[in-house]
């Protein structure tokens, strides 16, 4: 299936190549570069390209292109999903996925790629198994390695590949047995200029960090599972139990993983926790404009809004902005025409305000469009949908684990920079 | 390897070993004991001897090597160097260093060298000149070095084939290693070095690995198959054999990989899937994600060839009702002819979904909840292509969920959704808002979402969509705005109600400040106006004014075309526009120039007075244009419209040619008709056939035989027993049950499922056994479990060979198997196969037979007692029971005389089930009176053949068999008594079992049995019903109903069951025979086999084949006949009457000492006669 992989940085250099079948020359990437030239933004490069002899399927993540070459029919999503899995594995191993990190750990990266695909078909993609075969580097081990001359490869062969539970390694041991679950919810909304919500929905994920000895069998139940409209699970979750009893029953992988992601039905109107009053106008003369933004809390259920960041995509003609903020700081990037106002904690008594003037390119016509505004925020201790974890039970092991659940409401965690997209369109 | 090397390498391993001991990882020590390492126990000594030295090396990072300190500095920054341009000079030098390091005897140095080489490979640098130095290290025992050497080998072996061959023997040795991971990795590398010369070695290795006891090695073998195939396609046939073998594998680990190999090597061999279909469906949930995708895609194709279109009938019903947006009705029109042809057919025969089809849909549905987008998409396309219309909707929600994923995923999903929305708009209508566009979406996503929104537009939601579109037009992204305007145009053409609104909106856009917006609007308006130009002359006028301002060539050209085309509607403005255009002609773009010529020509033809000079001016300008197209056009137009003497007849038609009515363009979605590609495929995305794409076949007209997917029950019996015994053992040893197993325990629905059909139970059973072995391998008793596995394999081999041998052998093995088992278990699980009893009826006194008999008698008697207690009293109607019981008793007693062993097994001699033992004794007295008759009415109970009415899998646990009890059916003597046995092997009870008449042939009648109210799980019940077959072997088609389902079943009588015995003397027989001569007599010669020579065997067999009674021979001596018959060869006579019409059936078997015997049948009904001859002949000569 997947024939070769090229990693390409933002400026268009191929800095790593891996072939699973016979070698394909780098020149195949020229078709990709051509498409990249045409596209205005890196996101606009078509993920699937056809060349005379090959097909190129690429993803763009963390300012890197992962370009795979295939020769015959293969489901595009299969390849795309795999490439994303590669990125996630790198992130898991090295903390981030950037050109420098990959170059620094090139041998580990190569080993990983070798293990993940055999003849272009995925072989081991579960992080638990990979980590048994190839140990992730840590600062301590790197130091020890340089001192002793050993490397960070496992000296023994893994047994995990043959474990009956492909996502959990065997022989896990901890002195402190803990299981943490983070319920993270994101609001996704479009609000029109008059302030009415065009559509709003809540996406949630439950991120787990499970460090438990042996083979624990966990059961997680909710107070109000009916809230969940659409769910998708980590493969460890037993679907039949969910269907029948609405509980999550699973043998967890070791370490961090996403247990489930869900969608809360937007039927019950989602309350948007903040509002932004905006007034952006441009003078008829065409030399400048005014901007006035005020943010305030709307429905926060008594919790404080933190990490509030307002992003405004300005019209192309705006050259610079000279503004004053009553709270937080702002930056304006004239290249991307993005105004970012980092407010931080929202104080309901003293509403933050940003105002000032904008200067336009000389001679440019008055920009007509109202810029769209994106809001990112964070509310601790609150799952905006009201989802509550009821209890966590463990079977199969004797000890008493420490259990913890945390709720966070966020806006903007997805790949797109912000998720509460309040798009102001004059209707 | 030289002894020296060996010695030098040992210490490192020793160090490793010490480490592992410290880590307290037991078992690993064993793993590391490769044959190379194990030979001597001397390494401890070596270790202590060399330790200080070695440690120094380790500490210093290899300062003992040739390079000395130079290495150290290089090692610190292995990546920085060589990145720039100076590679040409430094590289050979460094390669020398690397060679030196590789040749050194310290693993740490080797490792460092290999790391740097791999880093170079990763950057695409050529390191092929290091090949000899690297390949030497392939036998290195340090796993880290080895791994990297493998990486290098796989990369360069193809270029340096001769040298690569040096490494082959290492891999061959690795293939024999006791550690499965070493075997697997050896095979993996061996198959990855693309060297043609080793094809035979690879083939051998793959074959061997395919029957390896470790599922992981088998998985690797499956991976190796496509590698070998791409290297040498000539090996296809052999590889298919391996694939076939691996397809039968029952572990989830192997399933995905082998299907992938199947898809790459022999996707056309769909027949290989039949036997594995149900297994694959049942395993699917537990297969790893990537395998799921491949399997689902393959099964989609498979289902398209094997099942009927579930939507065929619905298409007929909803004809026209489905107002799909985009002329997809055109599609339907094409189909209509076909549909009508089918209409009559389908009305007669309602569609019933094949249970296997249902199984696939049911087992894939949970995967819609997968976290893997590819799996979700695979299931979605499966439902789209295979599910009944009413069920397709479930995929919408899952697909909408994928829209929150990465933009690449969105891109692919939206493409597929766009195709789906054309065919099934209703499916996505509730999710309309999910396709609303966000300002942060990349342009390509925006455009695709627009496409979907346009496809979803209908009369009801068009106003919302248009409002949404209006906001999009104000976006800053101009490409997106252009696409929006196009989308508005498409909505307007397809929804008549909003056409005017859209047009007005677009006209307003003409005053937009952005020229691109205006231009796009002009183009779209032009298309819309073509539909009804007369109503909109004011718009045309408005547009004419735009020519002063608008500069975009396409828009200008569009306006000019409009004015020219509809110049009658704007007679005053048109010449003026031409005048303006003539002035700017030379500065216009080419497409505009062409349109100016067109406009001039059209005006000349309609309004030559005003425009003659202008036209000539334009044509003259065009004549000297740079572009030859324009010069040509000008010349052509001039000849056509300006009448000269030279020009021919063509100019007469100029008006017709140029002012012909042009049809309005149809604005179509680019996704129309894309669904002939399998959704989710690359070909679908690109809308061209990609290499290796397998066409999605059309539904078959008639369903192919579904029985090809039946897995033999015979096979599953030993499988099951074996598994359960293993399971028990496993439970003792390993605490953890297998994952899916525990799932079964916890989820009640699951267990019902898996028990209900044999395929799944056997599959999961073996899976358990497989996993059991894996787990035990992890534990310390490794060798022990290995042995077991081998044992198991041997058993499996035995089984296979036995299958081919005669049935007796199977029986034997079965009896062995079952003797290990507790009787109880056996009873609950699977009743012994039918053919056991068939062979019993043979007079075969092999020792195995007797052992089997005694054994099964034991077990069954116990089972029967239990059964009787539960079943007998409430169910069977008492009256017939008594009668039947009477006869049964007679038979039994007689059979004993004949030394015939009855050995009734539960479903074969159902009569036995009727009788409580006390009833039998009660009736004993009665039977005595009829002893005279008894020799004539022999009907060996053991030979009653039962037929399957409803398969266990089809019936979801309900298993129904029927046999012809050969008892008169009391309520109606013209009916054949059919005895039906229900066995409920499901986990839940079956309720209200009854029969309903479905479609009987004319004249046929059925007397149903009283409804069975409840049949608890694991129980059986027997009932008797009567069927009047009208003396024909046509099947009686019936409907078997339970509380929840209906099954179509049919009872097919063998001709021998359509008669009842009739008693007559030999004289009567001869008299009757004399009257049925000529056409009514059929004679056949035959050669009786050795064991059929004696009288007993002949009588036995004839009576088994047909329900006749024997005419007592010799008895005629007393009765009459003055001349005693000459003492000749014995003649056997049998007589009976057909059930319905009572016609006589007379059978004569005349045996001769030498030469062929003769079979004569006299019967009024010739059809019955001919069929009966065949059956009896078969029975006798077999």
Image: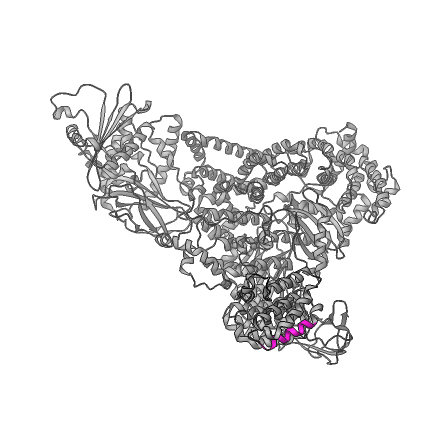
Residue B1003 in the image: x percent, y percent?
24, 47
B73 to the left or right of B701 = right
- Quarter of the image with the C terminus of chain B is top left
Residue B329 in the image: x percent, y percent?
47, 60
State the residue in front, B878 or A81. Answer: A81
Q: Which residues are magenta?
A: B570-583
Residue A230 in the image: x percent, y percent?
55, 61
User: In the rendered image of this protein, does residue B982 appear above or below residue A258?
Assistant: above
Q: Quadrant of residue B508?
A: bottom right
- Quarter of the image with the N terminus of chain B is top right
Q: Residue at x 85, y 37 (%)?
A: B65
User: In the rendered image of this protein, does residue B1030 appear above or below residue B604?
Assistant: above
Per the picture, the main secondary structure of the magenta-coloured stretch is helix
Residue B167 in the image: x percent, y percent?
71, 33
Count of picture labels? 0
Q: Quadrant of residue B546?
A: bottom right
B101 to the left or right of B1087 = right
User: In the rendered image of this protein, does residue B295 appear above or below residue B471?
Assistant: above
| Residue B582 sits inside the magenta stretch | yes
Q: Is residue B341 visible?
A: yes
Q: Is residue A223 visible?
A: no
| Residue B1142 sits inside the magenta stretch | no
B848 to the left or right of B634 = left
B643 to the left or right of A290 = left
- What colouring does the structure picture have? one colour
């Amino acid at each position: 299936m997947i024939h070769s992989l090229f990693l390409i940085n933002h400026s268009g250099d191929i800095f790593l190549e891996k072939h699973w079948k016979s070698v394909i020359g780098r020149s195949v990437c020229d078709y990709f570069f051509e498409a990249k030239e045409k596209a205005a933004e890196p996101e606009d490069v078509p993920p699937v390209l056809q060349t005379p002899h090959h097909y190129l399927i690429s993803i763009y993540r963390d300012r890197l292109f992962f370009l795979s070459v295939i020769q015959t029919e293969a489901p595009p999503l299969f390849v795309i999903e795999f490439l994303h899995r590669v990125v996630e594995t790198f992130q898991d191993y090295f903390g981030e996925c950037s050109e420098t990190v990959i170059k620094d750990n090139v041998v580990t990266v190569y080993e990983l790629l070798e293990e993940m695909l055999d003849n272009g078909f995925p072989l081991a993609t579960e992080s638990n198994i990979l980590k048994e075969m190839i140990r992730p580097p840590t600062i301590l081990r790197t130091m020890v390695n340089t001192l002793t001359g050993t490397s960070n490869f496992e000296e023994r062969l893994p047994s995990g590949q043959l474990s009956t539970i492909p996502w959990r390694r065997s022989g896990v041991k901890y002195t402190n047995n803990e299981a943490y679950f983070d319920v993270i919810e994101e609001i996704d909304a479009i609000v029109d200029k008059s302030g009415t919500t065009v559509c709003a929905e809540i996406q949630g994920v439950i991120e787990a960090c499970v460090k438990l000895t042996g083979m624990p069998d966990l059961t997680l139940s909710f107070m109000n599972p009916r809230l969940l409209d659409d769910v998708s699970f980590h493969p460890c979750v037993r679907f039949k139990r969910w269907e029948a009893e609405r509980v999550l029953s699973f043998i967890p992988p070791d370490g961090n993983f996403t247990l489930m992601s869900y969608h809360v039905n937007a039927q019950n109107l989602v309350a948007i926790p903040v509002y932004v009053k905006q007034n952006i106008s441009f003078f008829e003369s065409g030399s400048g404009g005014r901007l006035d933004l005020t943010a305030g809390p709307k429905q926060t259920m008594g919790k404080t809004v933190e990490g509030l960041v307002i992003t405004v995509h300005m019209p192309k003609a705006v050259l610079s902005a000279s503004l004053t903020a009553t709270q937080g700081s702002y930056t304006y990037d004239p290249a991307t025409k993005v105004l970012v106002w980092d407010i931080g904690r929202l104080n309901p008594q003293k509403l933050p305000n940003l105002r000032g003037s904008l200067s336009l390119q000389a001679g440019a016509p008055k920009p007509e469009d109202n810029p769209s505004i994106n809001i990112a925020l964070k509310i601790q201790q609150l799952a905006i949908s009201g989802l509550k974890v009821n209890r966590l039970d463990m079977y199969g092991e004797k000890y008493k684990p420490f259990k913890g659940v945390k709720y966070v409401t966020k806006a903007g965690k997805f790949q797109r920079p912000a998720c509460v997209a309040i798009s102001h369109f004059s209707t | 390897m030289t002894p020296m090397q060996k010695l030098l390498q040992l210490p490192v391993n020793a160090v490793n070993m010490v480490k592992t001991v410290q880590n307290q990882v037991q078992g690993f020590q064993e793993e590391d004991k490769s044959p190379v390492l194990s030979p001597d126990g001397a390494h401890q000594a070596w270790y202590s001897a060399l330790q200080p030295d070695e440690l120094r090396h380790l500490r210093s990072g290899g300062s003992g090597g040739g390079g000395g300190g130079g290495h150290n500095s290089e090692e610190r920054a292995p990546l920085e160097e060589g990145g720039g341009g100076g590679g040409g000079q430094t590289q050979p030098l460094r390669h020398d260093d690397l060679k030196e390091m590789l040749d050194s005897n310290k693993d740490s140095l080797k490792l460092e060298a290999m790391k740097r080489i791999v880093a170079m490979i990763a950057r695409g640098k050529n390191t092929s000149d290091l090949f000899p130095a690297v390949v030497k290290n392939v036998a290195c025992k340090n796993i880290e070095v080895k791994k990297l050497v493998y990486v290098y080998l796989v990369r360069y072996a193809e270029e340096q084939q001769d040298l690569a061959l040096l490494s082959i023997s290492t891999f061959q040795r690795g293939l024999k290693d006791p550690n499965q991971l070493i075997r697997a990795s050896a095979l993996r590398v061996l198959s990855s070095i693309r060297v043609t010369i080793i094809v035979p070695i690879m083939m051998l290795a793959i074959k061997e690995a395919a029957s390896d006891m470790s599922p992981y090695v088998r998985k690797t073998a499956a991976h190796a198959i496509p590698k070998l195939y791409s290297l040498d396609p000539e090996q296809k046939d052999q590889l298919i054999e391996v694939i076939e073998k691996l397809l039968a594998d029952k572990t989830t680990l192997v399933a995905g990989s082998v299907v992938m190999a199947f898809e790459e090597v022999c996707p056309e061999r769909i027949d290989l899937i039949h036997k594995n279909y149900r297994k694959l469906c049942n395993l699917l949930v537990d297969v790893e994600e990537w395998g799921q995708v491949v399997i689902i895609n393959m099964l989609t194709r498979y289902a398209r060839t094997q099942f009927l279109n579930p939507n065929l009938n619905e298409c007929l019903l909803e004809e026209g009702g489905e107002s799909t947006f985009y002329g997809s009705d055109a599609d339907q029109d094409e189909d209509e002819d076909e549909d009508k042809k089918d209409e009559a057919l389908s009305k007669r025969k309602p569609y019933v979904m094949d249970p296997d089809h249902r199984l696939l849909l049911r087992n894939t549905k949970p995967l819609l909840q997968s976290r893997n987008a590819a799996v979700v998409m695979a299931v979605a396309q499966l439902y789209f292509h295979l599910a009944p219309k009413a069920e397709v909707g479930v995929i919408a929600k899952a697909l909408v969920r994928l829209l929150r994923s990465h933009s690449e995923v969105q891109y692919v999903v939206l493409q597929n959704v766009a195709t789906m929305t054309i065919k099934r708009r209703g499916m996505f209508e509730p999710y309309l808002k999910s396709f609303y566009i966000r300002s942060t979406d990349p342009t390509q996503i925006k455009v695709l979402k627009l496409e979907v929104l346009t496809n979803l537009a209908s009369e009801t939601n068009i106003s919302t969509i248009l409002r949404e579109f209006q906001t999009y037009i104000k976006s800053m992204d101009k490409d997106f705005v252009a696409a929006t305007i196009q989308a508005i145009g498409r909505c307007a053409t397809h929804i008549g109600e909003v056409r005017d609104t859209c047009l007005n909106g677009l006209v307003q856009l003409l005053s937009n400040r952005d020229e691109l917006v205006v231009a796009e609007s002009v183009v779209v308006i032009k298309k819309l106006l073509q539909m009804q130009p007369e109503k909109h002359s004011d718009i045309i006028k408005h547009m004419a004014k735009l020519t002063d301002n608008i500069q975009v060539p396409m828009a200008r050209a569009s306006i000019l075309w409009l004015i020219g085309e509809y110049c009658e509607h704007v007679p005053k403005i048109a010449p003026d526009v031409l005048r303006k255009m003539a002035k700017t002609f030379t500065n216009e773009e080419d497409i505009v120039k062409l349109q100016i010529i067109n406009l001039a020509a059209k005006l000349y033809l309609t309004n030559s007075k005003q425009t003659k000079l202008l036209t000539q001016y334009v044509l003259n300008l065009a004549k000297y244009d740079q572009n030859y197209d324009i010069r040509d056009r000008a010349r052509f137009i001039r000849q056509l419209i300006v009448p000269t003497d030279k020009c021919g007849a063509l100019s007469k038609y100029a008006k017709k040619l140029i002012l012909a009515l042009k049809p309005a363009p149809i604005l179509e979605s680019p996704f129309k008709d894309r669904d002939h590609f399998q959704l989710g495929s690359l070909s679908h995305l690109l809308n061209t056939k990609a290499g290796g794409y397998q066409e999605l076949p059309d539904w078959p007209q008639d369903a192919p035989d579904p029985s090809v997917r039946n897995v033999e029950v015979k096979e599953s019996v030993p499988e099951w027993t074996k598994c359960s015994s293993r399971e028990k053992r496993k439970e003792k040893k390993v605490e953890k049950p297998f994952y899916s197993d525990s799932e079964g325990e916890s989820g009640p629905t699951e267990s019902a499922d898996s028990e209900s059909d044999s395929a799944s139970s056997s599959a999961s059973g073996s899976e358990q056994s497989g996993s059991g072995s894996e787990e035990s391998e992890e534990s310390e008793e490794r060798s022990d479990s290995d042995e077991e596995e081998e044992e198991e394999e041997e058993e499996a081999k035995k089984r296979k060979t036995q299958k081919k041998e005669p049935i007796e052998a199977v029986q034997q093995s079965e009896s062995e198997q079952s003797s290990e088992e507790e009787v109880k278990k056996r009873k609950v699980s699977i009743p012994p196969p039918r053919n056991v009893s068939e062979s019993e009826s043979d007079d075969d006194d092999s020792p195995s037979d007797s052992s089997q008999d005694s054994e099964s008698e034991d077990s069954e008697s116990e089972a029967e007692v239990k059964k009787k207690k539960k079943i007998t009293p409430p169910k069977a109607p008492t009256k017939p029971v008594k009668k039947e019981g009477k006869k049964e008793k007679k038979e039994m007693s007689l059979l004993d005389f004949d030394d015939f062993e009855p050995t009734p097994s539960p479903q074969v001699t159902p009569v036995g089930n009727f009788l409580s033992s006390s009833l039998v004794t009660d009736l004993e007295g009665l039977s005595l009176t009829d002893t005279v008759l008894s020799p004539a009415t022999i009907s060996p109970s053991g030979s009653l053949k039962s037929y399957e009415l409803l398969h266990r899998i089809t019936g979801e646990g309900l298993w129904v068999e029927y046999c012809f009890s050969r008892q008169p059916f009391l309520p109606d003597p013209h009916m054949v008594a059919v005895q039906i046995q229900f066995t409920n092997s499901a986990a839940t009870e079956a309720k209200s079992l009854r029969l309903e008449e479905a479609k009987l042939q004319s004249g046929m009648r059925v007397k149903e049995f009283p409804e069975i109210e409840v049949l608890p799980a694991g129980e059986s019940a027997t009932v008797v019903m009567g069927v009047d077959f009208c003396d024909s072997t046509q099947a009686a088609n019936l409907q078997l109903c339970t509380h929840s389902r209906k099954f179509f079943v049919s009872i097919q009588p063998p001709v021998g069951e359509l008669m009842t015995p009739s008693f007559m003397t030999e004289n009567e027989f001869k008299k009757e025979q004399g009257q049925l001569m000529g056409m009514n007599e059929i004679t056949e010669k035959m050669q009786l086999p050795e064991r059929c020579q004696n009288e007993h065997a002949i009588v036995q067999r004839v009576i088994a084949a047909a329900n006749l009674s024997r005419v007592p021979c010799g008895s005629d001596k007393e009765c009459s006949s003055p001349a005693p018959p000459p003492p000749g060869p014995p003649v056997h006579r049998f007589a009976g009457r057909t059930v319905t019409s009572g016609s006589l059936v007379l059978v004569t078997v005349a045996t001769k000492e030498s030469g062929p015997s003769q079979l004569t049948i006299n019967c009024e009904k010739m059809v019955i006669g001919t069929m009966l001859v065949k059956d009896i002949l078969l029975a006798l000569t077999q």
